Image: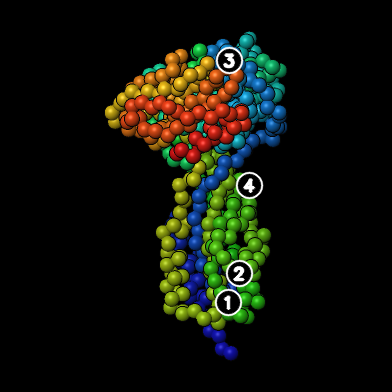
Amino acid sequence: MFQPRQLLVTALAILLFSCNSTDKQKEQSASPSLTKDTVASLKTEVKQDTITVIEKKPATFKTSKPQKAVIVNSNVKTQTSLESDFESIEQDFQDFAVNTNFDTTILCKEGTVIKIKHSGFLIASNLTEVKGTIIFQVKEFYKLSDIVSARLTTHSNDKILETGGMLFIQATSDGQLCKLKDNSPIEISFPFTEKKDSMLLFSGSWTDHKVNWELLPSGEANQKEIVEEAASFPGGSNALINFIQRNLTYPDNLADMGIGGMVQMDFVIDETGKAKDVNFKNRSQKSFKDAILKTFSKMPRWKPAKRNGVPIKSIYSQSITFYNEEQNTNDTLFKNDFEETINDTNINQVKVADIGQYIFSTSKLGWINCDRFYNNPKPRTDFYVDCGNYTELDINLVFHSFKAVLKNFTSKPTAKFQNIPDDEAVTIVVVKKINTDTFVSLTESNTNVKSINNLAFEKVTMDKLKQKLEQLDNTR
């Protein structure tokens, strides 16, 4: 039976190669030779997805069992019964053994990236240089539940802050507290999924169970520009097309039955440039998937994506259309769909990263906060909360439309939040002790009601308290 397949393949393939207008330079491509009369239409887009740990030299990098912090000077907090409750549910330290002979980049659990220069630490008590390995400890506070559990707030003197994340960082050498050299700042990258302008770096100090955030001077904290570079296949996008067309084989069983279709997928390009973890996004024939996986097993390494010069993982999305002339498909409709696919404006374009970063350099350790001042011109009001009877009290106002937590340190049954934004949805979080029992109340309200009372309290264990506070993470 006469099957004029090769002519169609060549014509469509030429159309495919001519559509890559996003390449800076035109690339020459040979006509494809595909088995089983296949057309592979490729739609690609890149988006940076995850951060990875990179060490500039082969330094030893370990995680040891979390230890309690060496809290000194203004970070000393006097223990109370309620204080003990919160401490029991506060997150543990992340501990990293860092060899000071090498530059090291570490990745924390919630996405914070910290770059540490070699030979950058001094013993704080006598200013002698640290040699060998230090224990570098980090606590991250991005979730509202973690912020409340740590009894943190977003206040800078009398001004409200909108937080992009808080950290506590310290380093020790043989149990002695360390500080950074003035000329060896660390670089901190705070992750975000929704970028906010005018983010700044603040340093926190504790007095009478209260933390206050002070804006770090420009000489002690500098924001760095983020430079992103997309992953690329050796030789460019046309070389990728040629590779797939040379190596992808139309499955015999489907070709003989005249079955075709489009396979949509994405895959990871890791920090070494290896293509892996193919994720098929639509329903398609198993034989098509197997053929694609076999092709990917032969794929050479890519040039990995980079953020500020550091290789990172990225996700590459792609669709491949298997077309067989024996399938019952209208050629005109197929060609139109094919042309629409390959002329999509997203082809070979870099998307905005799903996870971005605010990057600062600072020579400060201790309490660090990536925030901005809340400068909304909307009217202000006072808001009163009647907490009922208690022997100890912790009261928080958690805002919904922006990430802020305000605390009140009253010793009276009624707490007053002064000069706060009017008509804002909030969750009132009250944790209190009545003798040895712990009670919690989470109440949604709005600051336009001016006052609230008759809060419903629930007696809780520490596990239950932690679970209740975790409900805050769903308020935004």
Q: Secondary structure at mark 3?
A: loop
Label 1 vs label 4: CA separation? 37 Å
User: Mark 3: few, some, or many residues within 10 Å (few <14, many ≥20)?
Assistant: few
Q: Nearer the viewer, mark 2 or mark 4?
A: 2
* First along the sequence among labels 1 and 4: 1
Contact (Cβ within 8 Å) of mark 2 with mark 1: yes
In the foreground, 337 or 236: 337
Label 1, label 3: how far apart the Cα atoms are: 72 Å
Q: Give whichever of discs 2 and 4 has the lower sequence position.
A: 4
Give the residue number, with chain letter if any, for mark 3: 80
Mark 3–mark 2 distance (CA, rounded to whole Å): 63 Å
Q: CA distance from mark 2 to mark 4?
A: 31 Å
Q: Which disc, if any, is residue 259?
A: 1
Relative to 173, is 1 on the left or the right? left
Q: Nearer the viewer, residue 38 or 6?
A: 38
Q: Quick check: 10 above or below 203?
A: below
In terms of secondary structure, where does tag 1 sit? loop
For the residue pair 312 and 183, the one nearer the viewer reads as 312
Q: Earlier in the sequence, mark 4 or mark 3?
A: 3
What residue lies at 33% left-to-right and 30% top-to-bottom? 449
Which numbered mark, 4 or 3, is in the foreground of this view?
A: 3
Mark 2 or mark 1, which has the lower sequence index?
1
